[in-house]
Amino acid sequence: MTLLAIESSCDETSVAVVRRGRILCNLVASQVDLHAEYGGVVPELATRAHLKNLPLLVREALNQAAVEAGELEAIAATRGPGLPSALMVGYRAGEAMAFTLGVPFIGVHHHLAHLYSPWIEGKPLQSVLGQFEANVSLVVSGGHTLLVHMADVDHYRVLGSTIDDAAGECFDKVAKLIGLPYPGGPELDRLAAEGHPQAYAFPRPLLHDAGFDFSFSGLKTSIRYWLRDHPEILEDGHKLRDLCASAQAAMVEVLVAKTARAAKAFGVRCLTASGGVSRNRGLRQALLHVARGSGWHLRLAHETICTDNAGMVGILAEHQLLRGMSRTGWDEEVLPGWSIEQPGFDFSDDLHR
Ligand code: KG4
Ligand code: ZN
């Protein structure tokens, strides 16, 4: 199947062409510069940028993939969750293309696209999923922090999520306190690599809590007060790097400890991680360390598809269509608050194995 996918749930406009589990082309127009001066995503600006970028990206993606519009057998677009007006741009454009071409249209759940992204290997997803192992999956992004138990390919259960800020939000807010440009996560990661993670002891919220939920706003607040009392740190390059490393270590320790505890609780031998924050080198190393120590397999989303992109949307859409999931109707709407626990569909049992 050759499929075109669109992602526009937040501040990245992305268009991909995928075929049999392979991402032929995955273009992302980042809006980082546009939102940087506001220190966060401005929905109206994001929507206008999606409207401007999308037609160009569709044409360029088809060109780069050497695929004619007439060869497309389906169109997919992120349906939710996300910013309502931003979602509408990609969703309605995809729907209009599918209607015009007379091919199925499928609205994809953004978090599910992240959840499956560690399984993307450039070959038919069905064959990769043939080696599926029950796992505990960490989906960490700017807008979401989820710990998921995937018992089987199409059966998953959310074990925990954040009760306040998402992991990426915490990275970005801490980076902002330090004076790093938006979005600060990647820059904090870079500075942390040159600092000492045990230099300063910051709290590890909910680390010893029996549940699987996360909380990050207290950590951010404690770093804010700490900086108020130690303003000189910001003037010292070494100490600043130590601060980044220590803040990152606090976030990573909680994320990894909960993931490992969930793996033990559910008896799985495989961990996966995805979403923008899964690009973080400290997190990747810590997951590798814990997986090695316990003899578990580790599947990390490839670095090129951790942050929001249409490739992961297209690959999941292809999987869902091949599994017999019905196409999305023409009269459906975007779902800005779509919960991953109520995806609104079920894979039928006869198609399940
Ligand atoms: O998945 P994504 O592109 O968007 C959402 O769905 O939210 O994730 C973006 C988030 C931002 O908060 C960004 O700072 C964070 O991922 N991020 C990182 C790194 N790269 C991206 N956080 C920490 N370390 C990184 N290397
Ligand atoms: Zn995302």
Image (spheres, rainbow, N blue to C red):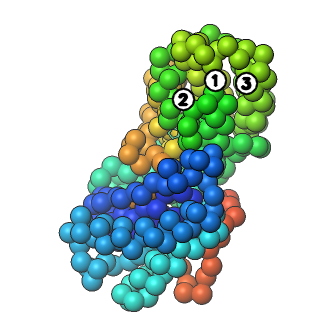
Separation of marks 1 and 3 at Cα, in angstroms: 8 Å
Q: Amino acid at mark 3?
A: Ile
According to the picture, the residue beneath numbered tag 3 turns out to be 223
According to the picture, the residue beneath numbered tag 2 turns out to be 188
Residue 107 seen? no
Q: Amino acid at mark 2?
A: Leu
Question: Which residue is located at x 58 percent, y 22 percent?
Answer: 244
Ligand 1 shows up in the quarter that is top right
Numbered disc 1: secondary structure = helix
Tell whether circle 2 marks a residue whose Cβ is less than 8 angstroms from ligand 1.
Answer: yes
Percent of width and height locating residue 350: 49, 71
According to the picture, the residue beneath numbered tag 1 turns out to be 247
Return the residue nearer the eye: 22 or 6. Answer: 6
Residue 101 seen? yes
Figure quadrant of residue 59: bottom left
Above or below: residue 188 compared with residue 331: above
Quadrant housing the C terminus: bottom left
> Mark 1, residues whose alpha carbon is within 10 Å: few (<14), some, or many (≥20)?
many
Q: Is there a contact, CB below 8 Å, between mark 1 and mark 2?
A: yes
Separation of marks 1 and 2 at Cα, in angstroms: 9 Å
- Of tags 1 and 3, the one toward the viewer is 3
Q: Amino acid at mark 1?
A: Ala
For this view, does 151 lie left or right of residue 22?
A: right
